[in-house]
Amino acid sequence: MSRVPSPETLAREELSIQFVNTVAWRLRDQAEDRIASPDSALKWLADAELADRRMVAQLRARWKSAPREADAFLNAAHGLREALYRIFVARIEGGRIDPAALADLNRWLGSASGSVALGPVGDTLRWLPTAEKVAPEALLKPIAWSAASLLTGPRARRVKQCQDERGCGWLFVDESRTQNRRWCSMGDCGNLAKSRRHYQRTQVAAE
């Protein structure tokens, strides 16, 4: 079962949460990786407005003759994503944060910003390249900064994991007034959970 968040969902969530959620059905035996290839990772970066069309075209062209660079980028992306997932889940569960995951995040935070910086696009600010030839890994740094800001800010306690019984596993920031949100999306996991409960009640009543 494929899961593709809508543009509205992407816009609502923190960048780092969006990135962690590129793994769908994470709590199942067979998860679904939405950035399983360098090309799909580039598409995700473009959708998240961390890379424009020109940059994506440049990198795709470059990687045709440099597949090792493409593989190194994908490994770096997966490494950052899984480190963030372990840290967020540890915070959610109140457990000990994996030192190796924290060290991975700190390496990203400690590296120089390099070839990306905030720049104006219309009346907004976005991460933009500052050099003609961009190191692909530099495009991932805003994700690490997003995670650090979320983890150290007042919303850290609002990060939760979807409680869908099918094994969704997506993370979200609970912005509800009562802080009792249980699902990543009421239109998906929430509705299905309610439908299951309704079906179970009708079955019991019919007995």
Image (spheres, rainbow, N blue to C red):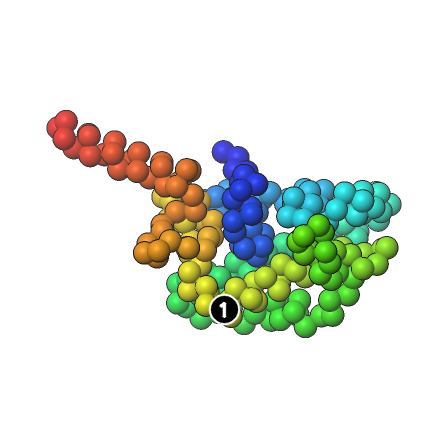
- Residue 118 lies in quadrant: bottom right
Question: What's the amino acid at mark 1?
Answer: Gly
Q: Who's the residue at 58% across and 54% down the image?
A: 15
Task: Check disc 1 and report the residue beneath it.
Answer: 153
- The picture places residue 184, in percent across and down from the top left corner, at 43, 47
- Residue 190 lies in quadrant: top left
Quarter of the image with the C terminus is top left
- The picture places residue 13, in percent across and down from the top left corner, at 52, 51
| Mark 1 crowd level (few <14, some 14–19, many ≥20, 10 Å Cα) | few
Q: Horizontal placement of 64 versus 183: left or right?
A: right
- The picture places residue 31, in percent across and down from the top left corner, at 52, 44
Q: Horizontal placement of 45 versus 63: left or right?
A: left
Say if residue 100 shows up in the picture.
no
Q: Which sits in the foreground, 106 or 37?
A: 106
- Of all residues, the one furthest to the top in this rendering is 206
Q: Who's the residue at 54% across and 39% down the image?
A: 6
Q: Horizontal placement of 58 versus 117: left or right?
A: right
Q: Which sits in the foreground, 99 or 122?
A: 122
Q: Does dot 1 land on a helix, a strand or a loop?
A: loop
Numbered circles on residues, count:
1
- Of all residues, the one furthest to the front in this rendering is 123
Q: Who's the residue at 78% across and 56% down the image?
A: 129
- The picture places residue 164, in percent across and down from the top left corner, at 38, 44
Say if residue 94 shows up in the picture.
yes
- Residue 178 lies in quadrant: bottom left
Seen in the picture, residue 75 relative to 150 is either above or below; the reply is: above
Q: Who's the residue at 16% across and 32% down the image?
A: 204
